Image (cartoon, helix red, strand yellow):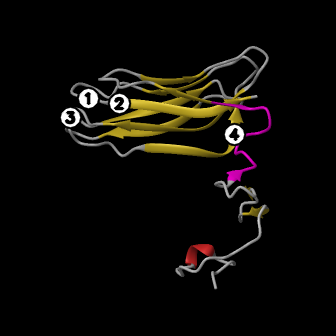
C-alpha cells in the first residue's frame, strides 16, 4: 500500500486506484484536480496574489560594468520583489562590492558580493528569496537590483530579479 502520510518516503510501485474526478491537496495546501478525463493534475492555486502579474528582469552579461536588473513600474500598480540572483566570474584581483536593492518601501537594501581573484574563477552566487514580498516605495515605482562592476579582468556578471505587480 502506498504511504499516503509521507509520499516522499514511499518507494513502492503499487498503484493507488481512486475514482475520478477527485480533488487532492498537498501539505502546502495546494489543491490538485484529477478530472474524469484522466488528464494531468493542474494546481488550482498560485504562488501569486489574485490579480498579480508575475515579472522578471535581467541585466544580461556584463564585463566589468554594473549588472542592473530593473523590475518595471506600471501606472496605478505596485511592484513587489520576491527575490534576486547574482552570478559572476572573478577578476584580475579579488574585489568585494556592495549590491543594492533600491525603490523598496523600507529604503535601500545592501548585500555584500565577492569576486574572487582570477578571471576564470567562479564567484559564489548570491541568491536571495524574500520570505514575504517587499513592495516598492510607492505605486508606479521601479525596483532596481545593482551588482557593481567587479574590476579589471572580469568578463561575466549578471543580475536577475523577480516579483510581481498588483
Report which residue position mark 1 lands on. Answer: 154
Query: For the stretch drawn in magenta, what is the main secondary structure?
Result: loop
Which one is in front, 9 or 61?
9
* Badge 1 element: loop
Q: Secondary structure at mark 4?
A: strand
Q: Nearer the viewer, mark 1 or mark 4?
A: 4
Specify the quadrant that holds the N terminus.
bottom right
Q: Are marks 2 and 1 in contact (CB under 8 Å)?
A: yes
State which region is magenta. 42-54
The residue shown at (54%, 35%) is 110
N-terminal of the pair, mark 2 or mark 3, is 3
Residue designated by label 2: 157
Q: CA distance from mark 2 to mark 4?
A: 25 Å
Q: Position of residue 146 (x, y in %)?
A: 48, 26
Residue 119: which disc?
A: 3
**The residue tagged with tag 2: helix, strand or loop?**
strand
- Residue labelled with disc 4: 133
State the mark number for residue 122. Answer: none
- Separation of residues labelled 3 and 1 (CA atoms): 6 Å
Amino acid at each position: 500500500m502506498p504511504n499516503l502520510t509521507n509520499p516522499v518516503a514511499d518507494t513502492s510501485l503499487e498503484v493507488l486506484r481512486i475514482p475520478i474526478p477527485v480533488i487532492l491537496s498537498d501539505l502546502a495546501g495546494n489543491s490538485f484536480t484529477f478530472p474524469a478525463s484522466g488528464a494531468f493534475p493542474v494546481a488550482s492555486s498560485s504562488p501569486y496574489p489574485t490579480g498579480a502579474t508575475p515579472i522578471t528582469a535581467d541585466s544580461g552579461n556584463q564585463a566589468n560594468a554594473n549588472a542592473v536588473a530593473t523590475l518595471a513600474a506600471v501606472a496605478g500598480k505596485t511592484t513587489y520583489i520576491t527575490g534576486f540572483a547574482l552570478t559572476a566570474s572573478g577578476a584580475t584581483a579579488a574585489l568585494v562590492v556592495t549590491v543594492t536593492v533600491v525603490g523598496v518601501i523600507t529604503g535601500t537594501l545592501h548585500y555584500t558580493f565577492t569576486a574572487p581573484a582570477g578571471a576564470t574563477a567562479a564567484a559564489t552566487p548570491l541568491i536571495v528569496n524574500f520570505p514575504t514580498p517587499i513592495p516598492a516605495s510607492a505605486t508606479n515605482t521601479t525596483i532596481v537590483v545593482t551588482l557593481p562592476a567587479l574590476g579589471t579582468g572580469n568578463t561575466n556578471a549578471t543580475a536577475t530579479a523577480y516579483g510581481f505587480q498588483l
